[in-house]
Each structure stands twice: as C-alpha cells, then as structure tokens.
Image (cartoon, rainbow, N blue to C red):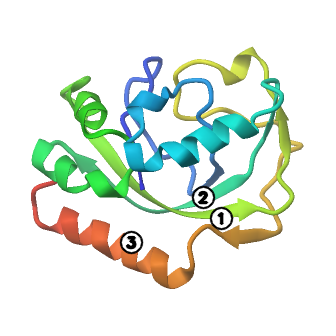
Amino acid sequence: MIVRKGGIGEKRFTLPHPRFYLFPGYLHQRPDLVAERWRPVFDGTLARREDPEMIPLTAYAELHSSHPISDPGALALLGPEHILTDDYAAERLRWRRKHPLWAVVLRVWRVEEPPVLATGPEHGGCVSWVDLPDSIRAPRALVPALPDDDFAAAAERIESILATGAAH
C-alpha cells in the first residue's frame, strides 16, 4: 500500500491508469521520512542506483483499490501497512486539508527484464505521474512481489481497517 496526496504541481491526486510502472523514489525521498523497519530496503534501493540519468523500471503495479483518508485515527491504524513514518504520514494528511490522503492498494510485480528510462527535465518535479516514451511498453515477464496468499491477506487487512468507518 502506498499513501499519496499528489505533488506540489498537482491540484489533487488522481489515479488515471489501472496499471503502471513504479518510478523509484530516489529524487524526492529522505531516509528519515521512511519508517525504521523499511529503511534497510530504502537504503538498498539508493545503493543500487548507478546512473541518475538512466533509471531501470523494476516494479510494475496494478491498482487493486483506493481509499480516501481524512481521519488521523484511520491513518494511524494503517501505519504498519506503508513505509512512511507516522509523523510524516500525519504531515501529508494535514497538507492541503480540504483534500484527502489516499491509501492505494497495489498488486506489485518485479519486472524480470526492466526497461531503462533515460531521464530528462520532464521526469523531474514533485508529481504523481510521469509520461514514459512510447518505446517503454507493458512488461512481459513478471514475478509477484508477494505470493498470492500474502497479497490477499494484506489487502484484506487494509480493507478491514478502512471498513471500520474511521477512514471517512
């Protein structure tokens, strides 16, 4: 699950695509905003980055569900399900108060032969979506990031938290 509110250059967060590559968060994230339990994974991602102008797109996602969150209590209950620190997640919820934070449940796969994106100025900035060149197509060979049963359990856990009514 990711939590999103949109970038500074966006009026609000939208989900215009049901399937998409996940763009690595090298450029905008700070390790201190990542929950302690996830920092080794985040640090590993940063360490694997060899050429800042050539980014391999190693993860592909499909939208499973999305849920607006306006209540701090619901966000707190979702804390174990995302990588942000509790304080930073709460800060994101408070930013642009009239717009909700979104809990987005994604089914994610590792791309066996990832395409490499040559980045340019059009890929920078604080935005939720970047346009990819036509040469980058949907991947053919995918490996689930989680086994089907583990994903189903995680999605059910999140849906259960959100069904308590605290999320709205």
Residue at 25 percent across and 24 percent down: it is: 95
CB within 8 Å, label 3 to label 2: no
Residue 75 picture location, percent across and down = 21, 48
Which label sits in the foreground, 1 or 2?
A: 1
Q: Is residue 38 left or right of residue 20?
A: left
Residue at 85 percent across and 47 percent down: it is: 115
- Label 1 sits on a secondary structure element that is strand
Q: Is residue 54 above or below residue 144?
A: above
- Label 3 sits on a secondary structure element that is helix
Q: Which mark is residue 82?
A: none
CB within 8 Å, label 1 to label 2: yes
Q: Is residue 72 left or right of residue 91?
A: left
Residue 83 seen in the figure: no
3 or 2: tag closer to the N-terminus = 2
Q: What amino acid does circle 2 point to?
A: Ala
Q: Which residue is mark 2?
A: 61
Separation of disc 3 and disc 2 at Cα?
15 Å
1 or 2: tag closer to the N-terminus = 2
Q: Which mark is residue 109?
A: 1
Q: What amino acid does circle 3 point to?
A: Ala
Which label sits in the foreground, 3 or 2?
A: 3
- Label 2 sits on a secondary structure element that is strand
Q: Decide which of 162, 149 is in the foreground and name it.
A: 149
